[in-house]
Image: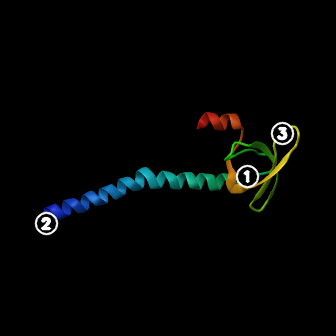
């Protein structure tokens, strides 16, 4: 009887470890990379928002980012967390 309880405890520990390494750890890495990308954001960077709007950063004021969307120079203000990728939008699509 004691070996059955030990086996079931080891199985639960193994399941928790697998859950951590398969789900939790990669998600934490993605969050860290996104936070670093937003911290290193600077004027002149090309960005893509989560809704697919592409533009060039004009100014950064705390958590607000203002960017121009094209030749007509329409300026849009978003919060930093709305930014999905920094860099050329064509390469961002290719890497996903």
The residue under label 2 is: 2
The image position of residue 46, as x and y in percent, is: 76, 43
The image position of residue 91, as x and y in percent, is: 66, 35
The image position of residue 53, as x and y in percent, is: 73, 43
Q: Quadrant of residue 64?
A: bottom right
Distance Cα–Cα, label 2 vs label 1: 57 Å
Sequence-wise, the earlier of marks 1 and 3 is 1
The residue under label 1 is: 41
Q: Quadrant of residue 6?
A: bottom left
The residue under label 3 is: 70
Q: What secondary structure is marked by label 3?
A: loop
Residue drawn at point x = 77 percent, y = 51 percent: 42
Distance Cα–Cα, label 1 vs label 3: 19 Å
Residue at the extreme right: 72
Along the line of sight, which residue is nearer the eye, 46 or 78? Answer: 78
Instruction: Give the left or right position of residue 38, taking residue 24 as reference.
Output: right
């Amino acid at each position: 009887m004691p070996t059955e309880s030990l086996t079931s405890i080891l199985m639960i520990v193994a399941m928790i470890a697998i859950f951590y390494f398969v789900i939790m750890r990669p998600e934490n890495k993605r969050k860290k990379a996104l936070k670093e990308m937003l911290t290193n954001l600077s004027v002149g960077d090309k960005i893509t928002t989560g809704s697919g709007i592409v533009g060039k950063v004009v100014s950064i004021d705390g958590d607000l980012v203002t960017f121009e969307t094209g030749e007509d120079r329409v300026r849009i203000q978003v919060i930093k967390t709305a930014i999905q990728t920094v860099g050329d939008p064509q390469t961002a699509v290719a890497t996903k």
